[in-house]
Image: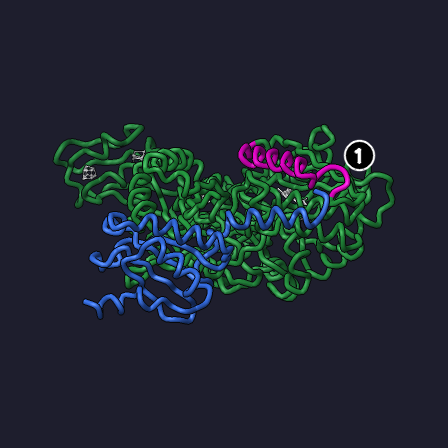
Chain colours: A blue, B green
Amino acid sequence: MKSLAELEEIRKRTLEKVNLRKDRGEGIRVVVGMATCGIAAGARPVLNAFMEEVAKRNLKNVTVAQTGCIGVCRLEPVVEVYIPGQEKVTYVKMTPEKAVQIVNEHIVNNKPCIQYTIGAAEKRN
Amino acid sequence: MELVRSHVLVCGGTGCTSSGCEKIIKEMENQLKKNNLDKEIRVIKTGCFGLCALGPIVIVYPEGAFYSMVKPEDVQEIVEEHLLKGRIVKRLLYDETIEEDDTVKSLNEVDFYKKQMRVALRNCGVINPENIEEYIAFDGYKALGKVLTEMTPEQVIDTIKKSGLRGRGGGGFPTGLKWEFTAKAQGDQKYVACNADEGDPGAFMDRSVLEGDPHSVIEAMAIAAYAVGANQGYIYVRAEYPIAVSRLKIAIAQAKEYGLLGQNIFGTDFNFDLEIRLGAGAFVCGEETALMTSVEGHRGEPRPRPPFPAVKGLWGKPTLLNNVETYANIPMIILKGAEWFASIGTEKSKGTKVFALGGKIQNTGLVEIPMGTTLREIVEEIGGGIPNGKKFKAAQTGGPSGGCIPADLIDTPIDYDSLISIGSMMGSGGLIIMDEDTCMVDIAKFFLEFTVDESCGKCSPCRIGTKRMLEILEKITNGNGTMEDIENLEILCKNVKSSALCGLGQTAPNPILSTLRYFKDEYIAHVQDKKCPAGVCKSLLAYTIDAGLCKGCGICAKQCPVNAISGERKNPYKIDTEKCIKCGVCMEKCPFKAIFKNH
Ligand SMILES: Cc1cc2nc3c(=O)[nH]c(=O)nc-3n(C[C@H](O)[C@H](O)[C@H](O)COP(=O)(O)O)c2cc1C
Ligand code: SF4
Ligand code: SF4
Ligand code: FES
């Protein structure tokens, strides 16, 4: 070890790998419904798209988790976004493309993509 | 880039290793492969999470789901349900983490963890101890970097002094002062050493730190070496700790590879190397002068002090010796500051203390609490109370050198001075909880048996004195004691305490003195009434069959290992008290509860 900078380099590089282990609480959480219905409807590519986009943009305070059936199987894949201090937003009929958009607009710029939310879908029906 | 979406932490501490975590890890890896998840989910073996009684333990992040008592056959369900489909397997969760409304609580809100504060154990159960980069990710070696590039040795010592840290090996000596003495001692060569002998029966605090976070000790020893002017260190660890030894070896090798041990660390002119020395596990080798003689390769026997190790230690050179847990606190003090550390705890006992919680308590395991936490909080909240609805009788701290805290002092804050004032001591962290079925004379006898075995024999007060004390205790528990014996015992205790050569003999009478202080009535009951109130001392027990309740089934007679029970079918059976060895089997097996233990 030659310098503190070198140490910091290792720290940063590894932190990304261990960040997941922080306890829940602060930070934004994206939860993807991954029950059988969700997986059948294509939840896995959606989960991957979230993970990739979050990693690409180096968003440290965002965790992407999965959960079981959220309860609206006909609207799967379903994704919930929790931002501390704000109402939970539920997105339905997700695709990888929508996922990228949600990361950019909702998570980064704090503008929920209303058109993909469960409220909008229910209205259309 | 490889994207990992979930971390599965499997405890690889001693407790969970013995309950089979290796099989869990293998099965987990198999199942993940089978389900094609091995790229996106990582399995990490960590150190002890603390709740060893519930092992093997598996925690899945980011959900933070805490699975307890996981069996290899459960792994498939965790993988297929939780990791594949995202449905947490409630059946396997530690039940304290499930809220009334069926949602899952964060671990920090669980009673066992809520009152704890993890400083020395900060990384245990969080990182993979065999991967130096994970330690670095959690700010590891940053304190060493800071010390070497920004601080003078005097500033380091000053910081430790201001933090108020005291030795965690039992004595409670101010750590900063010890560093200062060693720094100021004259000598061309100096050493630092780490005491990982941990000989108290039931203690496993230091072991857990070494197994779960070995780099924290290595980093701290390097900091200490810089502060006192040493370039060589020794870790004295007992050979009975194979996991700790192997993780330490890996950690030292990795630290060398990364240039964190060796020459010109952090580009400065500071050099430091570290070696492991294995001890054969004698309790006396934990005593500092005996430890050093043992490191030098001689038989581990104590010598009189002074001179103290800070002046004349290893090979006659000034040597700094600290305990594992003492060291584990150092990097945090450097990083977060002396004020931060001093803000935790009580006026004279700063920071936290790790305890190995054992005995008659629900949550046996490893806990770290801020100094000043009361015994009641530890027993009732963190420990989850006494099992089987029994009453709390006393707690024992300090192992064979310590004493007991009776139930009416349960609100005593746990800190160095409060414990001394009630005749116990902090010790290195063994904390044994006893319920109403514990005989205090028997407990004193247990510890004396230990010291008699472990006495090195060099000085006669300890060699002969402890043996005589044990003999008197045996006489009392056998029902042959007199009131005079109790008096003599007390005198003998005081004499040995004041005349033994080393700490082992000087503290050996403590378990007797403290039980005499708080439970003298129990001694008297053994002597005068020939009764053991807790029903433990076998010689004072008699098993009898109640002829009215006995249905004559004969089950007891079949079970008795020494054929002490006789009788005819359908008639009441009888126990021959001469033959009976008081094993209690008959009482346990009698389907009609017709057998009683009289005490
Ligand atoms: C009989 C006996 C056994 C001891 N065993 C240990 C031990 O296992 N671990 C330990 O750290 N200190 C033990 N000590 C205390 C050490 O002598 C020494 O005080 C301590 O290691 C200093 O480190 P500290 O100031 O960081 O606590 C023992 C002392 C005596 C008298
Ligand atoms: S088992 Fe109980 S009831 Fe049966 S013979 Fe023995 S004492 Fe009597
Ligand atoms: S206590 Fe044990 S030895 Fe005594 S009678 Fe019962 S079974 Fe036999
Ligand atoms: S060894 Fe696994 S929790 Fe202690």
Left or right of residue B291: residue B530: left
Pick whichever, B7 or B343, lies toward us: B7
| Circle 1 chain | B
Q: Residue at x 42, y 65 (%)?
A: A105
Above or below — where is B597 with respect to B285?
A: below
Residue A58 x %, y %: 51, 55
The answer to whether residue B262 is magenta is yes
Give the residue number, with chain letter if any, for mark 1.
B315
Q: Amino acid at mark 1?
A: Trp
Query: B553 or B106: nearer the eye?
Result: B106
Start-end of magenta stretch: B240-265
Q: Residue at x 36, y 47 (%)?
A: B68
Residue B365 lies within the magenta run? no
Say left or right for B232 vs B574: right
Is residue B357 visible in the rendered structure shown here?
yes
Other residues around mark 1 within 10 Å, as few (<14) / some (14–19) / many (≥20): some
**Residue B353 placed where, x, y %?**
57, 55
Q: Residue at x 18, y 43 (%)?
A: B592
